[in-house]
Amino acid sequence: MLEDLLGRSFPYLRLSVTEACNFRCSYCLPDGYKKTGVSDFLSADEIIRLVSGFADLGVRKVRLTGGEPTLRRDIPTIASAISALGRIETLAMTTNGYNLKTQAGIFADSGINALNVSIDSLQADKFHRITGHDKLKDILEGIDLARKAGIKPIKINCVLIKGVNDDEWPDFVALARREDISIRFIELMQTGDNGDYFRKHHLSGEVLQAYLTAEGFAPLPRSATGGPALEYGHPDHGGRIGIIAPYSKDFCTTCNRLRVTARGDLRLCLFGEFGYGLRPYLQSADQRNELTQRITDLLSYKTRSHNLGQGVTGLTPHLASIGG
């Protein structure tokens, strides 16, 4: 198992397969995705070599992210090849859900067995204003089709935006009560491009924690390969509520995931100031030992914590560039 100098282990890889996104979310890409030069994203073969190397080092959970991963036409091929390795127990994908209604069955057949869908409002008009797309109904239907296709767990990601969707907490909680689905509330994070928006709309996750406690929710144990969310459960709810609060005290002490960008750079932290190129080690299957040694060596550079509290956003201009 991969470990850093602080004794944290890393069974979980978040792998961006593209920086492109077809949404124009107000907190991320309000002006839409702008292509920069040649889209030299990792090829399917490079991705499989990369995942194979991480699997050698004990990674058992891989999350495919973007941008929007389903914009890659070969995403089912990539997922099928990762599944065929036989060593990845959880193959998850985070998506905006745009293509879910037409491709849910394809994703399930390719081996994707966990899904996070980004939905920042359950009100169609507000969803349209936030994302630039009037697609809420189709996305919810896509979630239902994914569930019927056997993908489980399915989680909804909702970014907390003060003055925009913070009045919808009861609606999301009600959804987790009546559906076998979990909700992840994500504290709005400052990135290189959204400073003014962040200062206007940031809301501490502690406010939501207090709300859940008052509603009878209680914290749940965290699994070894679980994500960064602090999960809450309620005896009357089939789903769970999670809070991802990167500005909270000791958030980084339970870090268990590494990130690789769509161009093959290892990021030891979402908001780190350095990326380490792995692509030179992905050109041949014969480079597996070099790849795993390089990854192992780089773990010594992982720091104790990010510096978001000091306004340091590192290399991340917006979350679409690395998948959050």
Image: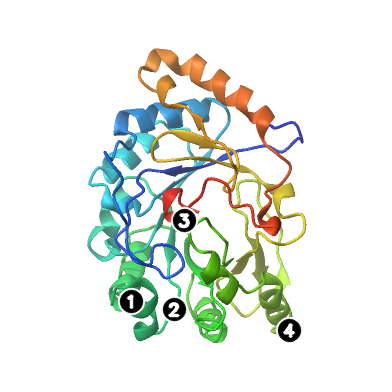
**Marks 4 and 3, Cα distance to the nearest angstrom?**
34 Å
Instruction: Evaluate if marks 1 and 4 touch, with contact meaning CB atoms under 8 Å apart.
Output: no
Determine the secondary structure under disc 4: helix
Residue that numbered label 1 is attached to: 136
Residue 68 or 32: which is nearer the viewer?
32
- Quarter of the rendering containing residue 50: top left
Determine the secondary structure under disc 1: helix
- Of mark 2 and mark 3, the one earlier in the sequence is 2
Residue that numbered label 4 is attached to: 214
**Which label lies toward us, 1 or 3?**
3
Residue at screen point 53% across, 35% down:
275
Instruction: Evaluate if marks 2 and 1 touch, with contact meaning CB atoms under 8 Å apart.
Output: yes
- Given the image, on which type of amino acid does mark 4 rest? Ala
- Of mark 1 and mark 4, the one earlier in the sequence is 1
- Given the image, on which type of amino acid does mark 1 rest? Leu
- Of mark 1 and mark 3, the one earlier in the sequence is 1
Residue that numbered label 2 is attached to: 121
- Of mark 4 and mark 2, the one earlier in the sequence is 2
User: What is the x, y in percent for residue 121?
Assistant: 44, 78
**Marks 2 and 3, Cα distance to the nearest angstrom?**
20 Å
